[in-house]
């Protein structure tokens, strides 16, 4: 039986604001290594015997970044399913299981969140091997993390006192329990038979679907229709929006694992963290002699046990302890490590006041590259634009603005109404209001440009697309 990895990449990670944002959530960020958490999740699969190409499930807004990150690590997914809206993990698992069952009726599904850190990859590989043996006999396996502290931010699994007769490293599941209070968490730790609930699973696709059909037939039916009516869009599979919207929003735990008699758990100590807060990132980070975790251009003096991250400017931190300081181009967040769970209150404030700092960074990624704002004022806006070699923007026009383009480096092919011209370094052109135009990178290196917009309205929604290779509206 092959193991089919399914990577769930639908989270938003608001507790890691201002770095994690709706358009660039934490699983797409390089938080610990040079690779993003999503890339690390895929890379650690390569040492597992019998594993197939991964299937990814993600938000349709993140599709091009997900595909690009897979290209960067030379991974070719079996499928990238696009969720039209969030519906928790059970529907995503159901759709992946249906697709795997159709291709490999006896196939095993390894369900992994895209935003977890695992430091001991060898222990992870061994746990998957153990879980696969149990899954081949029809069990639905979850992975329980051996707790290191009375953590109140995780759910717990109470395992049986003795392992299964057939496998020494696999235990029955006595109960799934919610996030506890501090006192209860300390009692769980002392008892020795409670494990952190990792949210990772391994089971036969058919076994999971049979249980889902029994306990939540509405999720099964809606997922089946969403997959049957899906459409192929470039490298992606778009699930049917109407069917998926009717699907109840439930986790795998609530929909199946807490109800089935087939649930078992594999305890594992593998340096696991869900990176659910800035303090969790400090816990797993490489620390200097004073206990500080530092990344970026930082000056630090007489400071201890801080997490300091500078993305765009020099940050100086002097004489403080136990703080989290995160700087980005448009926001700075300072919090005590004991209060980092309240970062989500900042995100709620931004939403309520109609701001955008929770949605995008100043650098906004597009399928063709990225742009970032440099300056703006009344009736003008200046942007820096990067177009990847071989890529091109849509053929478009604007009702309310004109644009000046200056090439900084690379070669630009510019379509302006019926005219096509090539521009190289230090050359420029003008796009009048109402002119049909397109920008392409005609060279072999990245095209960098400065765009100066002028006009009565400069919003991103002032775009009329006539042709777009990325099939955007």
Image (spheres, rainbow, N blue to C red):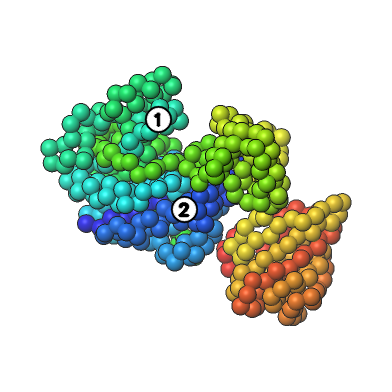
Count of all numbered marks drawn on residues in the image: 2
Hey, which residue is sitting farthest right in the picture? 378
Residue 401: percent from left, percent from top: 81, 60
Position of residue 389 relative to residue 298, above or below, is below
Helix, strand or loop at disc 2? helix
Front-most of residues 233 and 337: 337
Which residue is at a point 43% across and 41% down the rendered structure image?
273
Camera-nearest residue between 102 and 14: 14
* Residue underneath mark 2: 38
Q: CA distance from mark 2 to mark 1?
A: 26 Å
Residue 229 placement, left or right of 410: left
Query: Can see residue 10?
Result: no
Q: Residue furthest top?
A: 183
Front-most of 462 and 175?
175
Q: Is residue 192 visible?
A: yes
| Left or right, residue 288 beside residue 352 | left
Residue 398 at x, y percent in the picture: 76, 62
Name above or below for residue 177 compared with residue 265.
Answer: above
- Tell me the SS state at disc 1: loop
Nearer the N terminus, badge 2 or badge 1?
2
- Give the answer, above or below, for where 152 lies relative to 39: above
Asked where in the image residue 469 lies, by quadrant, the reply is bottom right
Residue bearing the label numbered 1: 149
Kindly identify the residue that appears in the image at 42 percent across and 32 percent down. 154
User: Residue furthest toward the left?
Assistant: 165
Residue 355, image x, y percentages: 71, 40
Q: Nearer the viewer, mark 2 or mark 1?
A: 1
């Amino acid at each position: 039986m092959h193991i089919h990895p399914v990577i769930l990449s639908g989270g938003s990670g608001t507790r890691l604001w201002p770095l994690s944002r709706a358009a660039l959530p934490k699983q797409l960020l390089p938080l610990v290594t040079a690779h993003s958490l999503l890339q690390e999740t895929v890379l650690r699969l390569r040492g597992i015997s019998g594993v197939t190409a991964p299937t990814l499930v993600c938000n349709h807004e993140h599709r091009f970044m997900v595909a690009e990150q897979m290209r960067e690590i030379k991974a070719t997914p079996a499928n990238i399913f696009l969720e039209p809206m969030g519906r928790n993990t059970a529907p995503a698992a159901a759709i992946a299981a249906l697709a795997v069952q159709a291709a490999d009726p006896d196939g095993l599904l390894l369900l992994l969140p895209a935003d977890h850190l695992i430091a001991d990859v060898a222990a992870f590989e061994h746990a998957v091997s153990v879980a696969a043996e149990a899954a081949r006999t029809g069990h639905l396996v979850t992975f329980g993390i051996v707790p290191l502290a009375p953590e109140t931010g995780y759910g717990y699994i109470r395992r049986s006192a003795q392992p299964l007769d057939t496998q020494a490293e696999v235990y029955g599941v006595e109960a799934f329990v919610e996030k506890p209070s501090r006192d209860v968490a300390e009692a769980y730790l002392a008892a020795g038979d409670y494990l952190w609930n990792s949210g990772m699973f391994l089971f036969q696709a058919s076994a999971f679907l049979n249980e889902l059909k029994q306990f939540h037939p509405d999720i099964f039916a809606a997922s089946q229709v969403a997959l049957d009516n899906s459409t192929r869009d470039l490298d992606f599979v778009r699930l049917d929006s109407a069917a998926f919207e009717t699907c109840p929003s439930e986790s795998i735990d609530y929909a199946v694992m807490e109800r089935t008699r087939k649930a078992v758990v594999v305890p594992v100590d593998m340096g696991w963290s869900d990176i659910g807060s800035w303090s969790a990132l400090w816990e797993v980070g490489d620390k200097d002699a004073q206990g500080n975790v530092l990344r970026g251009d930082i000056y630090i003096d007489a400071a201890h046990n801080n997490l300091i991250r500078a993305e765009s400017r020099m940050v100086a931190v002097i004489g403080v302890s136990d703080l989290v300081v995160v700087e980005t181009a448009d926001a700075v967040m300072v919090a005590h490590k004991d209060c980092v769970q309240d970062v989500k209150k900042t995100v709620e404030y931004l939403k309520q006041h109609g701001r955008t700092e929770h949605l995008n960074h100043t650098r906004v990624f597009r399928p063709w590259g990225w742009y970032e704002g440099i300056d703006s004022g009344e009736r003008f806006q200046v942007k820096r634009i990067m177009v990847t070699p071989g890529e091109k923007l849509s053929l478009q026009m604007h009702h309310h603005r004109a644009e000046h383009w200056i090439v900084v480096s690379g070669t630009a092919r510019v379509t302006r109404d019926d005219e096509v011209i090539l521009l190289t370094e230090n050359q420029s052109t003008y796009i009048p209001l109402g002119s049909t135009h397109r920008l392409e990178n005609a060279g072999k290196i990245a095209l960098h440009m400065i765009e100066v917009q002028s006009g009565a309205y400069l919003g991103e929604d002032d775009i009329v697309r006539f042709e777009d290779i990325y099939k955007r509206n």
